[in-house]
Structures are given as C-alpha cells and as structure tokens.
Image (cartoon, rainbow, N blue to C red):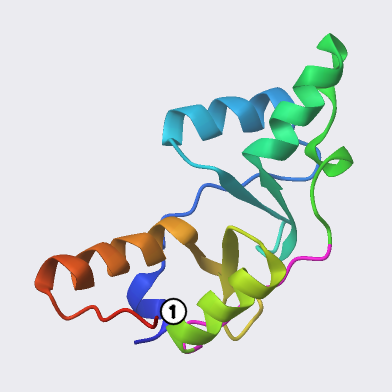
Amino acid sequence: MTVEDLMTTGVMTLRARDEISQANVEMKLGNIRHLPVVDEKGHVVGIVSNRDVMRALGRSGRAKKLPVSKVMTREVITVRPETPAHRAAEIMLDRKIGALPVVGEGEQLVGIVTESDFVAVAQELLASGTGRSAR
C-alpha cells in the first residue's frame, strides 16, 4: 500500500498572505484540521493546523486579520505518492504530526495524507478480522 492509495487529492489550500480568519472558516466548512500553504506555482511553503489557528485566535481579536504566514509551520515534511504507507505512518508517529502533504515530480502539491486516513485503514482491518495486535 502506498500513500497514493490513501491520500486525499481535492486538497483545500491557503496562500501565505491569506488571513487566519479565512483558514478558520475553511477548516470549519471542510471539517478538516490541516491546510497546506502553497505559492503561486503550487509548491508547499507551509502548513497550518487547527491548533495553530485556535492558538492565534485565542491570543487577540486582531489575530483574525493576521496572515497565515505568521502561524504556519514553514519546514514542512512532505512525501511522494509512491512512498510506502507504512513509511508515511512512521514519519507521522516519529515527528508527532497529523498530516503530510504529498508532492509530485514537479514538487507541486498533489494530495495530503492524514492521521484520519490511517485510522480508516485500521478500522477496516479491525472490522475484517485481519488486523492483528503487535502486542
């Protein structure tokens, strides 16, 4: 199984200049917790989590107008569609992150894989009775 088998391809994104209030609205409308931030060429330049947004909004009423560039994580770990899914899960566990943007050959965003994608796989395996405990 590869990341391509799990990833979501219709990814909502932000630009660095977009306001935190827009990120908040997009996350609520899409019922999502992570938004990649891309440049005009579709390259990932950051990622914003719902925690980043809530933390910023909790600090000040004026935070709504701040650009997401003020709260985004800039050093984003990405994976390729052909990355083995177990390797992506390992990265997420090791780094304690909830999402990995997926980039193609031109380094443009092509998808995102999240902890929810892995929970869905686990649920399917457990429901089918093929999931085995490692303990």
Magenta highlight: main SS: loop
Number of marks: 1
Residue 127 in the image: x percent, y percent? 14, 65
Q: Residue furthest left?
A: 128
Q: Amino acid at mark 1?
A: Val
Query: Is residue 130 left or right of 19 when viewed as pictured?
Result: left
Q: Nearer the viewer, residue 57 or 110?
A: 57
Q: Nearer the viewer, residue 56 or 38?
A: 56
Residue found at x 48% / y 82%? 81
Say which quarter of the image contains residue 118: bottom left
Residue 37 in the image: x percent, y percent? 70, 52
Look at mark 1 in the image and give the residue it sits on: 3
Query: Is residue 62 left or right of 37 when viewed as pictured?
Result: right
Residue found at x 79% / y 47%? 72
Q: Tag 1, which secondary structure?
A: helix
Taking the magenta stretch, the answer to whether it contains residue 109 is: no
Residue found at x 11% / y 72%? 128
Looking at the figure, which quarter contains the N terminus? bottom left
Q: In the rendered structure, which segment of residues is drawn in magenta?
A: 75-83
Looking at the figure, which quarter contains the C terminus? bottom left
Q: Residue furthest top?
A: 61
Q: Is residue 34 above or below residue 128?
A: above
